[in-house]
Amino acid sequence: MKLFDRLLPYQREFVSDKSRFKIWLSSRQIGKSFGTAFEAAADCAKHPGAEWLVMSAGQRQADEWMLKASRLSRAVALEMAGTDEAVRVEVSASEIRFSNGARILSVPANPDTARGYSANLVLDEFAIHEQDREIWAAVFPTVTNELSGQKKIRVVSTPKGRGNKFAELWEEGGPQWSRHKVTLDDAIAAGLRVDKAALREGVADEDIWRQEYFCEFLANDTTYFPLDLIRACERIPAPEAPPDAPRYIGVDIGRAHDLTAIAELAAVGEELRLVDLETVERAPFAEQRELLWSRLSRPSVRGVAIDATGIGAQLAEETRAKFGSRVEPVQFTNTTKNGLFQSLHRAMEESRLVLPADRELREDINAMHRKISTGGNIQFTAPRRPDGHSDRACALALAVDCAERNARRGPIIMPEVLVAPAQFRARRLV
């Protein structure tokens, strides 16, 4: 078949493998769905009455897989035209019918629909299926029922942490599984044309890069900032900076349960030095405002990133109104937290962040965990402790991100702003 020759070597290897049970651990964007769709289309064209069932993680993924399968089915039918095996193809949103009685079906990925079919099975991006264990319990007995014939199973996915059925099948499924693994480097070596450097720069996260493109099963719950990484940034005595060095401030707002933390960085050459870190506990917002605004009166303060989530919204709005564009309110979401803590992690890895050797700060940063859900989503969490909720780490991440964004924009000319000196002072770390 000429279409087969157009597949990349690793796709041909997977399609050519006639094992009953196959599992494919794959990098993102290397054509794994195309490979499974080709196998289903070619099998249906050549074997009258063959049935294939695909279950994808969601409707969008199902539509994409069926689009590939429909195009391939038509191409296979066209290639077979004029031969004794010629077939016609009819396509709808959830079904591809061949004139020889074969068909390809797409159904929602849930245990109820899975129980109703006995067909060759493709579990597409199985690592992010909801109810993956319930789906497996429903489909495996049906597919392996010998009364319905020797049905095949194809389990395909990029890894999404541990603790899901895909990871379990890959690592513990036993010798009956034929295993295929293709990383991004494997695909490039086999002829895939892709700009690896651009991909790496766009990902900007080592763990995501290792998981999504190099097929590593990462722990679902890990300390994102190991103690060795933090200690490598610490200096004794505490870091200092020239008075006129540009300053960048991060503010994490708290009130009843959490601390308010204000982290001040000084940019000295390539380094970001933590020269001041204050925390206040259960202080009225008027006092918090006075404490923050006294800092912003200094011309050396070039940027402020302030937590504008929930109770912080009013203080962020008032501060922005008074001090203008150098104040950036930040809503904490999973997306913004990912960006903030990735910036902090990158600055620490690159030895650009200089910290005082302080136990509370060290423990606060180390307590920040990154969790990968069964759906592949990444969340940053920290335990709530008597001295806060990793509030110092949040303020520091805000300050680092603020400094880096201001550096990309270039210098900002600040207006002169005068406010009365603060009468309320809080615990100061350095």
Image (cartoon, helix red, strand yellow):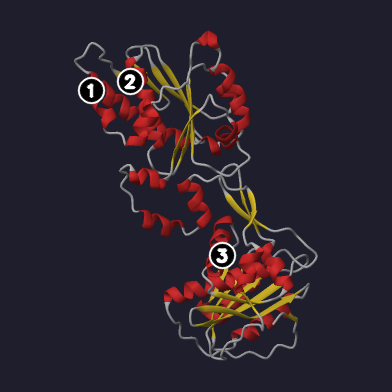
- Residue 40, by quadrant, is top left
Q: Secondary structure at mark 2?
A: strand
Q: Secondary structure at mark 1?
A: helix
Q: CA distance from mark 3 to mark 1?
A: 53 Å
Say which residue label 1 marks: 79
Q: Residues within 10 Å of mark 1 (few under 14, many from 20)?
A: some
The image position of residue 304, as x and y in percent, is: 57, 76
Cα distance in 3D space between marks 2 and 1: 16 Å
Task: Find residue 202 and report its image quarter.
Answer: bottom left
Q: Nearer the viewer, residue 60 or 417?
A: 60
* Residue placed under numbered mark 2 in the picture: 90
Q: Is residue 364 above or below residue 325?
A: above
Rendered location of residue 371, percent (x, y): 63, 51
- Residue 184 visible here: yes
Q: Residue furthest right?
A: 386
Q: Which residue is mark 3?
A: 345
Q: Between 306 and 68, which is closer to the camera in this rendering?
A: 68
The residue at 75%/84% (across/down) is 425
What amino acid is found at the position of numbered circle 3 in the picture?
His
Circle 3 SS class: helix
Q: Is residue 243 above or below residue 72?
A: below
Instruction: Report the disc number at residue 37.
Output: none
Among the two numbered marks 2 and 1 on one chain, the one whose residue lies closer to the N terminus: 1
